[in-house]
Amino acid sequence: MTRAFSDDSLNRSLEQKGYVVSSLLEPDAVSRLAVSCEVLRSPVTHGFHATVHAKDVEFRRAVFSAITAVMEAPLRQRLPEYRLRMANFVVKEASRADSEVGFHQDWSFVDESRFVSLNVWCPLVDVGPDNGCLHVMAGSHRLSVAPRAHGDAHPFADILAKIRRRHVHAVPMTAGLGVFYDGRLLHGSPPNRTDRRRVSVGCVMVPADATLLHPFGSRHWKWSSSRWTRSSSSVMTRGPVRRVFAVWGGSPPPSSSTRPPC
Ligand SMILES: O=C(O)CCC(=O)C(=O)O
C-alpha cells in the first residue's frame, strides 16, 4: 500500500480508525476558498448540495480549478505520494432540516485490494453537531471491500439504525482542519440547524501510481469471492476513466487503464 502521511503515527491511526484529523489550511486559504464558493454558486433547491452534482461541466471544472489552486500544495505536503483527482464544494444551507446527509461510503476510485484512496473533507467554517459536522463510524472502512458505484444499494441498510445508535460519533472541527478518511469509512452529517451556511470542501486523493478505476452500473454485477460476475443481461458501462472524470469534474491522470476491476 502507498504510504499516506510522512508521520507514521498518523498512518497507524488511519489504518486503525479509517480517518485522521489534521491541520490543512491557513486562515487566508480558508478565506480564499470561502470567496470562491460564494462566487461559484450553483442554482440549488436542496438544503444540502455538492457542486460535483451540478450538470454544467464548465462549472464543475471552474470549481475544481479554484480548489486546486489553493489546496493542491498543502495536500501534497500532507500526502506526498498522493494526487488530487476530484474536488468540490459541499454546502448545507442555513436552518434547513433537509440538509442531513445519510450514512454512506464514498464511491471507489482505485482497486482497493491494492490501493487506498483518501477523501479529504475540510470545513471553511467551524463545525459541530448543530451545523452539520461529519459523523463517522471508526473502523468501518474494514467492513467491506466491494467496489462502490453511484446508485449502488446501501450494503448496510438493514443495520444502519443500530450502527448509528451505538457506533457513530461526531467530529467537531475548526475551519481549515481536514478529515482525511478512507473512502470506505461510513460517514454522514446531521442537518444544519444554525442560521449560517455551512461550507466545506471535499476532495479525492489517489496514490500517484494507482490506475483510476470507477465502476458504473455495478448493480447489474455481483461482487463475490473478490471478483465481479454479471448478475443480469445488462452490460456494465465500462466508462473510460476520461469519461468518468469529464462527468465528475476531476482531472484525468496522465495515463490510466479504461477498465473497471472485473
Ligand atoms: O458535507 C457533508 O456534510 C457530508 C459530505 C459527504 O458525506 C461526502 O462528501 O461524502
Image: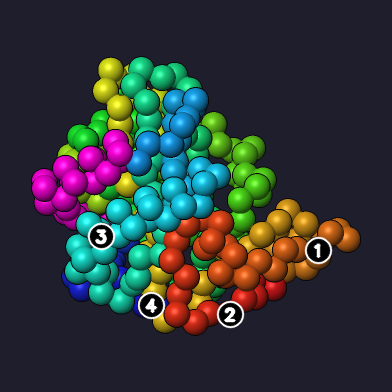
Which disc is residue 79 wearing?
A: none
Quarter where residue 128 is shown: top left
Residue 108 inside the magenta-drawn segment:
no
Quadrant in the picture for the N terminus: bottom left
Q: Which residue is mark 2?
A: 257
Q: Work out whether residue 61 or residue 252 is closer to the camera in this orientation and state it.
A: 61
Q: Position of residue 180 (x, y in %)?
A: 31, 56
Question: Given the image, on which type of amino acid does mark 2 rest?
Answer: Ser
Q: Work out whether residue 146 or residue 16 is closer to the camera in this orientation and state it.
A: 146
Q: Position of residue 53 (x, y in %)?
A: 51, 44
Q: Earlier in the sequence, mark 1 or mark 4?
A: 4
Q: Which residue is mark 1?
A: 235
Q: Nearer the viewer, mark 3 or mark 1?
A: 3
Which disc is residue 69 wearing?
A: 3
Q: CA distance from mark 3 to mark 1?
A: 38 Å
Q: Earlier in the sequence, mark 3 or mark 1?
A: 3
- At a point 21% along the width and 66% down the height, the residue shown is 73
- At a point 78% along the width and 57% down the height, the residue shown is 220
Secondary structure of the residue carrying tag 3 is helix
Q: Earlier in the sequence, mark 2 or mark 4?
A: 4
Mark 3 Cβ and ligand 1 under 8 Å apart: no
Image vertical order of residue 201 relative to residue 180, above or below:
above
Residue 181 seen in the current view: no
Instruction: Assess disc 2: are there few (<14), some (14-19) or many (≥20) residues with their C-alpha within 10 Å of its C-alpha.
Output: some
Residue 194 seen in the current view: yes
